[in-house]
């Protein structure tokens, strides 16, 4: 985490500003003596080979960052809070969780966090060292929990956030199972027809063209050209182009410019754009409400919330709102000027600002939009299925028209 709640924190500040669960407090970590706040043990006596190995591992984690899955993150937060509420020491809690998640991507991360806590670092620093694995909301809320001394409550709040996100993802997957199966079967049938059946039928038509000088209509000519392309280039060219396109889009999405362009294109797609906008509005409300409720100033809360959003246009709008709020403007006026969020969202925020209950109104807004998104996701399969059937019917209709028009052309030519 590059920035804390109140601004930039140095390594020493992060170790000593927490008095709760972190290693910088004077309270014992695992029931024994309090952790040392002096220099890291053994740091000066490390061999050059070991320091080089640590640097190589750090570089590898930055080049190939590990992102903790939402499922594991939700379970981890819930279990972490339960252990601490039960009075289990921090070190013993982390060790137990490390044993449970040893075979997941969270296992090595927890191992490094345990080492950092034993060196005397706070949870904020230990988790911030694993920055690629955790989002900005998680890191900022962990820091707030340490400052306020309410880590278990913070972890329960985070578990609710991640469980809601996971529930939405599972609903989307469930709704898309049937359409995906239909699409895969359709692709397989079209591929077999194109590779096995179509060349033999087209060969007969091409013989008629050479012998009888038959002039085929446009659909038949398109079908013949497509078959020639598959025959000369090879059937493998079609899946190669498909998977190559997927890889190129994925690589482009990982770049800043490519992600911004693809996000804007996605927002223009009917139905999909509205759903994505509602999902990001939900994240905006869910991320901003707990930060404001914890007493974080509006500017810092907006800055941290922008990092948790999914779409680049939404991040840009919230970043501009942050600049406007920092200059003394209101959040609702800043968002109205951006013309990105819905009027309903602006109304909720304006009501919260006027009544002094912005966190509560943002929570209500998040609940409302989450229900809307869940309803859309549950019914998305009912929308996609007719589109798939229409697409499959269009392909079949084209083949029928192509062959019948070719057949009629042959009959007409032979009757002369």
Image (cartoon, grey):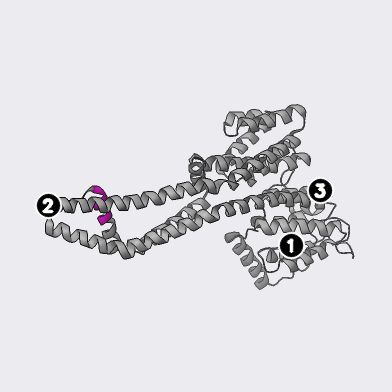
Give the residues in magenta.
Answer: 218-224
Residue 147 badge: 3
Above or below, comparing residue 100 to residue 219 in the picture: below
Residue 160 left/right relative to 312: right
Asked if the residue under mark 1 is in contact with the one under mark 3, i.e. CB atoms within 8 Å, the reply is no
Say whether disc 3 or disc 1 marks the residue closer to the N-terminus. 1
Residue 309 x %, y %: 62, 45
Above or below, comparing residue 376 to residue 203 in the picture: above
Decide which of 236, 34 is in the foreground and name it.
Answer: 236
**How far apart are the two marked residues, 2 and 1, measured between alpha carbons?**
85 Å
**How far apart are the two marked residues, 3 and 1, measured between alpha carbons?**
19 Å
- Disc 2 target residue: 415
Residue 376 x %, y %: 59, 43
**How far apart are the two marked residues, 3 and 2, measured between alpha carbons?**
92 Å
- Could you tell me if residue 126 is visible in this image? no
Packing grade of label 3 (10 A; few <14, some 14-19, many >=20) is: some
Decide which of 230, 197 is in the foreground and name it.
Answer: 197
Residue 268 in magenta?
no
Residue at image point 59% right, 28% down:
337
- Disc 1 target residue: 113
Residue 414 left/right relative to 84: left
Residue 354 x %, y %: 74, 26
Q: Nearer the viewer, mark 3 or mark 2?
A: 2
Packing grade of label 1 (10 A; few <14, some 14-19, many >=20) is: many
Outermost residue toward the left in this view: 416
Residue 95 left/right relative to 395: right
Residue 159 x %, y %: 73, 52
Residue at image point 81% right, 50% down:
153
């Amino acid at each position: 985490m590059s920035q804390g709640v109140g601004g930039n924190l140095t390594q020493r500040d992060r170790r000593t500003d927490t008095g709760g669960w972190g290693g910088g407090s004077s309270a014992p970590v695992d029931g024994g003596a309090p952790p040392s706040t002096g220099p890291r043990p053994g740091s000066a006596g490390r061999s050059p080979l070991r320091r080089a190995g640590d640097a190589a591992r750090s570089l590898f984690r930055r080049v190939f960052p590990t992102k903790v899955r939402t499922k594991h993150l939700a379970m981890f937060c819930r279990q972490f809070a339960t252990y601490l509420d039960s009075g289990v020491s921090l070190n013993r809690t982390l060790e137990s969780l490390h044993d449970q998640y040893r075979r997941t991507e969270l296992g090595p991360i927890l191992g490094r966090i345990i080492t950092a806590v034993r060196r005397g670092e706070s949870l904020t620093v230990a988790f911030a060292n694993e920055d690629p694995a955790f989002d900005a909301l998680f890191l900022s809320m962990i820091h707030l929990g340490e400052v306020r001394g309410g880590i278990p409550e913070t972890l329960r709040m985070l578990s609710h956030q991640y469980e809601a996100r996971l529930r939405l993802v599972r609903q989307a997957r469930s709704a898309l199972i049937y359409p995906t199966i239909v699409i895969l079967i359709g692709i397989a049938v079209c591929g077999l027809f194109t590779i096995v059946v179509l060349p033999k039928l087209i060969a007969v038509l091409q013989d008629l063209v050479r012998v009888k000088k038959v002039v085929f209509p446009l659909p038949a000519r398109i079908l013949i050209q497509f078959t020639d392309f598959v025959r000369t280039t090879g059937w493998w060219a079609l899946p190669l182009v498909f998977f190559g396109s997927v890889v190129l889009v994925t690589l482009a999405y990982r770049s800043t410019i490519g992600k911004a362009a693809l996000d804007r294109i996605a927002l223009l797609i009917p139905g999909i754009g509205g759903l994505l906008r509602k999902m990001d509005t939900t994240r905006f409300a869910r991320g901003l409400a707990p930060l404001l409720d914890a007493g974080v100033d509006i500017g810092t809360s907006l800055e941290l919330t922008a990092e948790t959003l999914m779409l680049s246009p939404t991040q840009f709008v919230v970043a501009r709102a942050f600049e406007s709020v920092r200059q003394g403007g209101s959040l609702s006026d800043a968002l109205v000027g951006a013309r990105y969020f819905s009027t309903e969202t602006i109304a909720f925020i304006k009501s919260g600002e006027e009544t002094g209950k912005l966190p509560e109104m943002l929570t209500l807004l998040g609940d409302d939009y989450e229900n809307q998104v869940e309803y859309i996701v549950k019914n998305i399969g009912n929308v996609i299925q007719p589109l798939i059937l229409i697409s499959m019917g269009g392909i079949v209709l084209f083949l029928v028209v192509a062959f019948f028009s070719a057949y009629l052309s042959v009959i007409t030519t032979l009757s002369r």
